[in-house]
Amino acid sequence: MTLLVNDPRTFADEALAGFAAAHPDEVRALHGGVVRASATPPGQVAVVLGGGTGHYPAFAGWVGPGFAHGAACGNIFASPSASQICSVARAAENGGGVVFGFGNYAGDVLHFGQAAEQLRAEGIDVRVLAVTDDIASAPAGRPGMRRGIGGDLPVLKMLCAAAEEGRPLDEVERAGRRANAATRSLGLAFDGCTLPGADRPLFTVAGGHMGVGLGIHGEPGIEERPLPTGDEVADLLMDRVLAERADAAGAVGGSDRIALLLNGLGATKYEELYVVHRRVAERLATEGLTVVAPVVGEQVTSLGMAGLSLSVTFLDAELETLWRAPAVTPAFRRGHLARRPDRTDDLTAVGSVPAVVPADADSRALGARIAAALRTVRDTVVAHEQRLGDIDAVAGDGDHGLGMRRGAEAAAAAAEETVRLGGGARTVLARAGAAWAERGGGTSGALWGAALTAFGSVLGDSGATDGARLTAGVRAAVDAVRRLGGAGPGDKTLVDAALPFADRLEEVRGDNGFAAAWADAARVAERAAQATSTIPARRGRARTHGDRSLGTPDAGAVSLALILTALTPYFRQENR
């Protein structure tokens, strides 16, 4: 039970503020999370970790020399937004590029991916690593579908140690991926956790039983069985994790040396963990495995959940060196590192939105036209908010119209402000995209934010534009949506309207000019959006009720088609 709460809505922010106040020599707070109190050495790769609040020490407790350069902290069990992630990354980065590390959950994949798109548009090289250690969440043949649980610690520790060595970005990313491929975890729960302000746990386990294969966001296990002895718990964990020994060890050449984390989930205390670890150590010896620097304790928790998890990473010489490397953070300490000079910059000056960069007259004029177009987008969405909500309610939660209105209003306001500040086309779209994602929220907000950012990256902040450049911007926007959302044709998402639009625009742009091509492509998008009524949903929240959506078009595809049609007048000047 989470008992010490003021307002549940501010719990995550207050916890982060208290954490930063408790460790002023180690971390500094800023919008979205914390960074090291010491500056990132020039040219060193910056590793930014993140996820929802409720998993302490993950992820803020791992910020410090030898480990992470920063951590983006979302709400309880919720991904941080792209603007929070970008804010932390901008403060941590110092010329070496950035690696994002997080557990493989849909919200984190989406928002860290959107943040990576934004930062790349600003000229920062960003790599993304999602930890996939949980053997209970997908079969061995589908590792990309697995969640990140306790294995976050060894994988991200080794990733960060590679950065601390001063390796270039490619090598840091490679080390992290090798550690992830060699890591396997399994968790057990004896009782669920309770969100701040809630009066009951997210799930319960019958007395005298345990859930096998739990997640760390309050997800119950995949099976329930009678609660055994401590030794039998250890044997179960060992049997399941080592069932994939060949694949995990094979990722590093067939090793018999391992890193180990026996992790408490919040309410299972250290003496109990040590009882289990005693048997784990015995089993490892009989399996011919040598444990290197084991860790027993709370590292990846789930508020007050009763339970534990076992993580094993098979090591070669490279990964063992990274695992043993010193680190000094509020919650993970190994070895010794000399104290670094404190950073002295003003973190309140680190923006949650892209900076306005100088633009030439042509791009500023285009930026003003884009701002006007975004006002039309806003007005279109507001006019159809109720309709879009009603469509979404058939197989979703009915919030698509509201989210689109919030996002479009924020984007239009951000664009107008950027024009006043002298921004060009790229900057107008980047700041509008950041505002849309932040205010619109959810998957839709992130995808629209990424699309606007990608479009702007093609247009740039200098030079005139033409139909070819605008067409390339459209393609970049659609590609960003597909890359981040993972949807394809026939999944009943906005992609079903966006992809035919981009294809048709490229096909006919040279025939009668860009404006005519846009109008033609918009009609194609409208027909494609309506055609989604004949297919069940296969992506997003509606996928679990996919057949219920038959006969109703997808709300995201419909909203896109409405916007594309409304924007047609803004391209009548582009007849090349």
Image: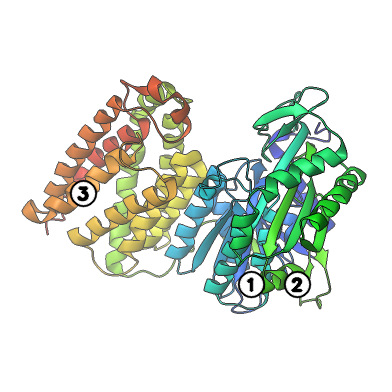
Q: CA distance from mark 2 to mark 1?
A: 11 Å
> Measured from the top left, where is residue 96 in percent x and y?
56, 75
Q: Amino acid at mark 1?
A: Ala
For label 2, the SS is loop
Q: Give the foreground label among 2 and 1.
A: 2
Give the quadrant of residue 28.
Answer: bottom right
Quarter of the image with the N terminus in it? top right
Q: Which mark is residue 545?
A: none
Residue at position x 39%, y 63% in the image: 422
The crowding category of the residue bearing disc 1, from other C-alpha atoms within 10 Å (few below 14, some 14 to 19, many at least 20), is: many
Which one is earlier in the sequence, the residue at label 2 or at label 1? 1
Q: Do the residues under discs 1 and 3 have CB atoms within 8 angstroms?
A: no
In depth, the one of 384 and 175 nearer the eye is: 175
Q: Nearer the viewer, residue 5 or 41?
A: 41
Task: Report the residue marked by disc 3.
Answer: 503
Going from N to C along the chain, the mark reached first, 3 or 2, is: 2
What is the distance, in whole Å, between disc 3 and disc 2 at their CAs? 51 Å
Position in image of residue 14 (x %, y %) = 75, 45
Please state which amino acid type lies under the numbered disc 2: Ala
Taking the spot 30% from the left edge, 64% from the top edge, the residue there is 363
Is 365 in front, or is 457? 457
Graded by Cα atoms within 10 Å as few (under 14), some (14 to 19) or many (20 or more), the crowding at tag 2 reads: many
Q: Earlier in the sequence, mark 1 or mark 3?
A: 1
Q: Residues within 10 Å of mark 3 (few under 14, many from 20)?
A: some
Viewer-side residue, 419 vs 50: 50
Q: Amino acid at mark 3?
A: Asp
Q: Which residue is mark 2?
A: 325
